[in-house]
Image (tube, helix red, strand yellow):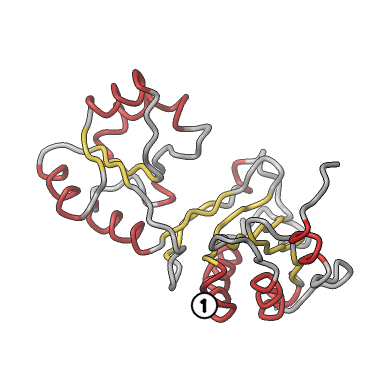
Amino acid sequence: MPKRGKKYQESTKLVDRTVQYETEEALKVVVETAKAKFDETIEAHIRLGVDSRHADQQVRGAIVLPHGTGKTRKVLVFAKGEKLKEAENAGADYVGAEDMVEKIQKENWFDFDVVVATPDMMGLVGRLGRVLGPKGLMPNPKSGTVTFEVEKAIKEIKAGKVEYRLDKTNIIHVPIGKASFGHEKLNENFRVLMDAIVKAKPAAAKGQYLRSITVTSTMGPGVKINPLKIMG
């Protein structure tokens, strides 16, 4: 195992690994453990009692966090005609069609965080599935990134919209803000996220839905939250 730095070791002393904290207390602790010289991102990691291999047990969606993520996200929009102009006026960082596909394919260009596409452009965007898919950048109707409401999509993303989705180990990883937000704003963001995930519970899910919840800063240790209190 690699040796942990002095700041990490100091931070671990603030966390009781045997305890599942109440949400607000956990977020106070995680902010306290964010000791890096930069403004650390706070993430939530939620393990669900579902099997992501089954289509009827998928959990995926998107929500706008009330206080945003603290990060400015670059948006690439695939559109044409009036929708292309709408994207430019709404503040998209990059807009285009075949030219953008070519740029990504030939230049291995990925200077963007989110991809939005109008439905009529998905045939074109589909050519990029092999490169966008593994990076989690493929537009999807469930996350609101395949839409003719281009202006709305861009403004929500810029305002702090985040996507949540299961990985292969049935865990959802979502940023809920920055350490500088303080525990109260992080708590509000976290509540909105958890409400959405609880509402998205598949009918096919059996047993305990929220198996474990951990919040952590970029460089700090994980802090466990009691999942039973969230469902309650």
Q: Horizontal and vertical percent for residue 207?
A: 78, 60
Instruction: Classify residue 79 as left or right of residue 194.
Output: left
- Quarter of image, res 140: top left
Up the image or down, 23 lies above or below 159; here it is: below
Q: Quadrant location of the N terminus?
A: top right
Q: Quadrant location of the C terminus?
A: bottom right
Image point (24%, 53%), residue name: 149
- Quarter of image, res 228: bottom right
Q: Horizontal and vertical percent for residue 171?
A: 68, 50
Q: Residue furthest right?
A: 18
Q: Residue furthest top?
A: 106
Up the image or down, 229 lies above or below 197; here it is: below
Instruction: Classify residue 122 as left or right of residue 54.
Output: left
Residue placed most toward the observer, 226 or 105: 105
Residue placed most toward the observer, 104 or 14: 14
Image point (65%, 66%), residue name: 34
Mark 1 packing: few (<14 Cα in 10 Å), some, or many (20+)? many
Q: Horizontal and vertical percent for residue 217?
A: 64, 61
Q: Horizontal and vertical percent for residue 194?
A: 59, 68
Helix, strand or loop at label 1? It is helix
User: What residue is pinned by disc 1?
Assistant: 185
As shown in the figure, which amino acid type bears the numbered disc 1?
Lys
Instruction: Classify residue 220 as left or right of residue 109.
Output: right
Residue placed most toward the observer, 230 or 107: 107
Image point (61%, 46%), residue name: 56
Up the image or down, 188 lies above or below 144; here it is: below
Instruction: Classify residue 126 as left or right of residue 57.
Output: left
Image point (29%, 48%), residue name: 147
